[in-house]
Amino acid sequence: MSKRIGVYPGTFDPITLGHMDIIKRGAKLVDELIIGVTTNIAKSPMFNDDERIAMVKREVATIGNANIRVVGFNSLLMDFAEAQSAATVIRGIRGVTDFEYEYQLTGMNRQLNDRVETVFLMADVSLQPIASKLVKEIALYGGDIAKFVTPTVRDEVVARVAKLKKASD
């Protein structure tokens, strides 16, 4: 029997408790889970690719699950999944808006590569409101993001916000 490999892609800018929940649960569904950290040209990342990959690796290491790897990529998701020999893409969904977007994306991905299935995991109820974009916005306005990210990620985001504000002065 072949190894079941899954990919959980995202920008993870920054990685949130919601992401961590999907990673922990997704890892139970496959023999190996590859966290694909990508650049989304439609987003303006707070952290560069290398910083985000390092952040995700550090946070994933706290799970203590040997079947999780973190890999950076900058290509179509279906090409990345194929290169990783993945048969499954795992996506987290917080609500109806996420579903509508993911539904369309999944349809397009099926057109590109129908050998890769997409599995949706609903976010834990307590984590559903968390979005990286909102975490960054709260931090940029001086709000407390401790409920949404780990302490280490909080410190990194706060330091980056301070750096950005200093640069704009």
Image (cartoon, rainbow, N blue to C red):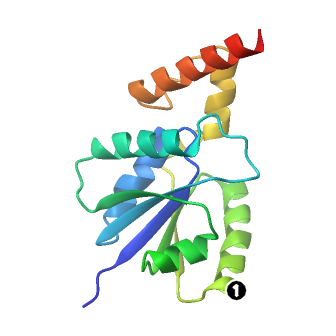
Left or right: residue 95 compared with residue 24: right
Given residues 24 and 165, the one toward you in this image is 165
Instruction: Work out whether residue 15 can be spotted.
Output: no
Can residue 71 be seen?
Answer: yes
At label 1, the amino acid type is Gln
- Looking at the image, which residue is at 65% across and 74% down? 106
Q: Residue at x 42, y 80 (%)?
A: 85
State left or right for residue 133 relative to residue 122. right
In the image, is 146 to the left or to the right of 48? left
- In x, y percent, where is residue 19? 48, 47
Name the image quarter holding the N terminus.
Answer: bottom left
Give the residue displayed 66% in from the left and 23% down from the top. 138
Q: Is residue 71 above or below residue 157?
A: below
Q: In which quarter of the image is residue 133?
A: top right
Measuring from the top left, give residue 169's x and y in whole percent. 77, 8
In this view of the protein, which residue sits in the foreground, 151 or 71? 71
Residue that appears at 68% across and 11% down? 166
- Compared with 13, 115 (above or below) is below
- Taking depth in this image into account, of 25 and 37 the one nearest to the observer is 37
Query: In the image, is residue 34 above or below residue 82?
Result: above
Q: How many residues crowd around disc 1 within 10 Å: few (fewer than 14), some, or many (20 or more)?
A: few
Q: For this view, does 69 lie left or right of residue 108?
A: left
Look at the numbered disc 1 and give the secondary structure of its residue: helix
Q: Mark 1 points at which residue?
A: 111
Image: 71 above or below 83: above
> Front-most of 68 and 28?
68
Q: How many marks are shown on the rendered structure? A: 1
Estimate the x, y position of residue 3 in percent, counting from the top left.
29, 81
Relative image position of residue 162 (x, y in whole percent): 61, 14
